[in-house]
Amino acid sequence: MKRFLFAFLAAFVFIFFWGWLYNGVLLKDIYAQTSSLWRPQSEMMSLFHWIILGQAILVFAFVMIYASGFAGGGVGAGIRLGIMLEILAIGARMMMYAVQPLPGKLVLYWSVGGLIEMIVTGAIVGAIYKPSANINA
Amino acid sequence: MNPKKLFLAFLAAFVFIFVFGFLWYGNLMHGIHNEVPALWRTEADFGSHFPWLILGHVVMAFFLTLLYARFVPGGGAGAGARLGIMVAFLYIGNNLVTFAVQPLTTKILGGWIVGNLLEFAIAGAIVGAIYKPSTTATV
């Protein structure tokens, strides 16, 4: 339980800062080119708690999946899980691209950023979380 | 890994999530989505991007099946549904972030959350019911 909490916290801190750096700084100009698809900055800030909650749920689900079926495999197993989950997310992004007028390069950048995010998250979780007794993965 | 069962499970999951997506997001939520028309492609534009929708479903169904085969092979429908629910929560987390940055209504957010839970729980159960490891479980 203690390891679970540490893994969750470390992964959450990483995802929060990565999300801010990648989406808030690096992709800022692309978002500005498609402003009709996004809330105004002030409105976004008033809904910021949804971002925190969403990232917390995402990280919690990641650690739960790792702890339930991949635990004991260490950093390598965490990275493999991260890659698989990101490819699932890329599938969802393709669907999003089909229905929303998103520029293709934004979807591509999201996928590259998402892959980096999930690989590092997997490595963090795999390095920290260890099953308490037997490895029954 | 049992390639034949993996393929069958993938196929069944793909058909289910495609039909579910059409009914839930395309039909039941059609009016709700149209409350914010600026967020969606026009019918003609959507038609020309339809292959991306198919490919997205294929990728999603395949990797859900692969995840199950690596995660709880032989666990059955219950284990598949549990995995599906955990995967759904990854999407729900992402839905909440999307709600904060895109002008979605709370009805759209609610519909997506319920849709994700149903879609992945059932798809996971389908995969779990069909996929069986060929010999012993090797995770």
Image: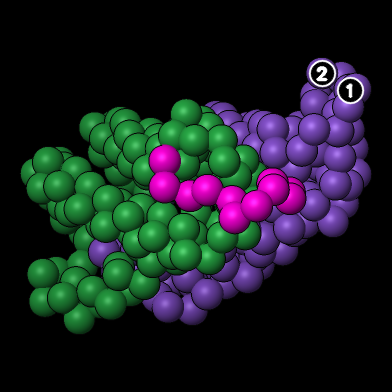
Q: Nearer the viewer, residue B31 or B119?
A: B119
Q: In the visual, does B82 lie left or right of A66?
A: left
Question: Magenta residues, as a range?
Answer: B129-139
Chain A colour in the picture: purple
Q: Residue at x 69, y 33 (%)?
A: A68
Which numbered tag is attached to residue B98? none
Q: Does residue B88 show up?
A: no
Which chain letter matches label 1?
A
Screen quadrant of the N terminus of chain A: top right
Residue B126, can we see it?
yes
The residue sitting at 62% across, 40% down in the picture is B72
Query: Residue A132, labelled with which disc?
Result: 1
Relative to A95, say whether A50 is above or below.
above
Q: Is residue B6 left or right of residue B108?
A: right
Specify the quadrant that holds the C terminus of chain A. top right
- In the orientation shown, which residue stands out farthest toward the top? A1
Under mark 1, the amino acid is: Ser
Left or right, B137 with reference to B133: right
